[in-house]
Image (spheres, helix red, strand yellow):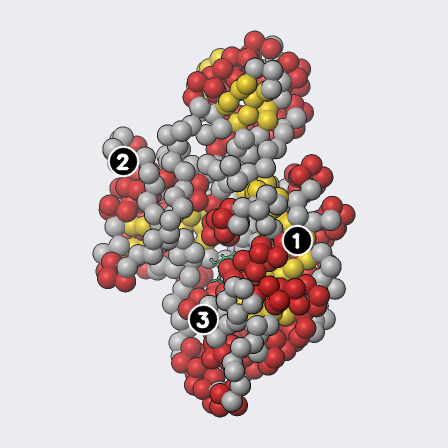
Amino acid sequence: MSQWTASVGAQQLGRLLDAQYGRGTRSPVTSLNGRRVPAYRSLADRIRLLVLEGRVPVAARLPAERELAAALSVSRTTVAAAYEALRTEGFLESRRGAGSWTAVPAGNPLPTRALDPLPPEASGSVIDLGCAALTAPEPWLTRAFQGALEELPPYAHTHGDYPAGLPALRRALADRYTARGIPTMPEQIMITTGAMGAVAAICRLMAGRGERVAVESPSYANVLQLMREAGARLVPVAMADRLAGWDLPAWRQVLRDAAPRLAYVIADFHNPTGALAPEEQRRALVEATRAAGTVLVADETMSELLLEPDVELPRPVCAFDPAGSTVITVGSASKSFWAGLRLGWVRAAPEVIRSLVAARAYADLGTPVLEQLAVSWLLGTEGWDSALEIRRAEARESRDAVVAALQRHLPDWEFTVPRGGLTLWVRTGGLSGSRIAQVGERLGVRVPSGPRFGVDGAFEGYVRLPFTVRGPVADQAAVRLAEAARLVAAGAPVAVESPQTYVA
Ligand SMILES: Cc1ncc(COP(=O)(O)O)c(C=O)c1O
């Protein structure tokens, strides 16, 4: 189990139940979905939903029956019957004298480990909604490489190994932070192989086997998997509802109780939910992580993809820790420009950068020179900002098309439309997201299911849709998903294993 064992107190569970479903949980006979059901059944259903929605982690210790009964003002028999029902359904495991822990049933499809990119020849028949990444913003890709080729000759006389990155690009990125109001020196920047390369380098240095890493729940699937494979113990912290950012009391509790070595967050247009953490939350989380001695990794991969003209972006997380003693920032050219460059970076204190660079000798040694020159050219000309405008226009058009198509064909699927980013986090009307993904694959639409973005089994009732398709393709994707939903609702047979969707 890659996870940290959380404990949920009786008062805390009471608050979570109230916050999500109102105080109805506490009456002896209550209604869920308009039905009148016994109180124990309602309580069991609601605890099950908290687990499936990632509000209570899997493998969390639940309060003793007597304590929960007192906190909810219900009888102990009600709690005992609810726990028994959860045990029968596989959502609770108990050991006499030791307590009870949340679980997901053995048959609940968990995300597979393997990633299986869709072969290019399948692109004519399958609508691939697995990757939140757009095609290159031409003519700027071609122009950038033309500019890079002109800059290349002096580098041909060197060995070409730059483990910290090309000085010109480190300077250009440092200047960009300085222009955003966060004074930065080139020594605070390291160029990496995409944001993934940056997170991998940080994990190698700081989050080895058994180390605790607090993550948002849900979070970016590939980073979760990277951390699991590094042997880190993931500590999930639920996101606030309706794209309201982080749940600061939950963060403070995890920082206090689990004392994680690292915390990994996506403050800007979070993948998958699209949430944008407000500025006061950023300040508060930096303060809380600093007080806990936890290093806060802020992934800014999506930060430039603001899709609304009237929204003022909060200051970056590192603005609240400019010297970089607590915050390590991860950036990338993948969403602002093009993922095919495989170019990212780290911004941190100079001594952290030196340690990351030293550790890199045993990983990938460096990032290709020509790609670095291309990004340096883009940042030094109007190329970056012009390409970004193309990006934003495409993503905005796609977001609006995807939202309209879902409203047309799947009116009972729920979501909150984000103001930026590339992803829509969709509740699939009570149906299993994993099963929809599996049936969708057969019908020619590929979507990643919710559990890929959770820690150990949460978010079964979700799928993530990217803003990468427009016009009739967006409509056709929703038509196929609606057909998949119809088949799943009708009980279409599907294997237990979820498809090996490539997620980015
Ligand atoms: C939050 C986040 N981090 C990292 C990545 C991967 O970035 P890169 O292509 O730079 O490795 C993605 C891609 O979707 C992402 O959404």
| Secondary structure under the numbered disc 3 in the rendered image | helix
Answer whether labels 3 and 2 touch (C-beta < 8 Å): no
Evaluate whether residue 42 shows in this view: no
| Secondary structure under the numbered disc 1 in the rendered image | strand
Give the residue at x 63% y 70%: 189
Residue 320 placed where, x, y %?
Answer: 73, 58
Give the residue at x 69% y 36%: 257
| Secondary structure under the numbered disc 2 in the rendered image | loop
Sequence order check, earlier mark of 3 and 2:
3
Crowding around mark 2 (Cα neighbors within 10 Å: few <14, some 14 to 19, many 20+) is few
- Tell me the residue that label 3 is attached to: 341
Residue type marked 3? Leu
Q: Between 36 and 277, which is closer to the camera in this rendering? A: 277
Q: Is residue 280 shown above or below 458?
A: below
Give the residue at x 24% y 45%: 442
- In whole angstroms, how far apart are the C-alphas of marks 3 and 2? 38 Å
Q: Is residue 54 shown above or below 446?
A: above
Residue 478 placed where, x, y %?
Answer: 32, 48
- Tell me the residue that label 2 is attached to: 494
Q: Is residue 504 shown above or below 454?
A: below
- In whole angstroms, how far apart are the C-alphas of marks 1 and 2? 41 Å
Crowding around mark 3 (Cα neighbors within 10 Å: few <14, some 14 to 19, many 20+) is many
Give the residue at x 55% y 38%: 3
- In whole angstroms, how far apart are the C-alphas of marks 1 and 3? 26 Å
Evaluate whether residue 81 shows in this view: yes
Residue type marked 1? Leu
Quadrant position of residue 325: bottom right
The answer as to whether callout 1 falls within 8 Å of ligand 1 is: no
Residue type marked 2? Val
Q: Between 242 and 133, which is closer to the camera in this rendering? A: 133
- Tell me the residue that label 1 is attached to: 296
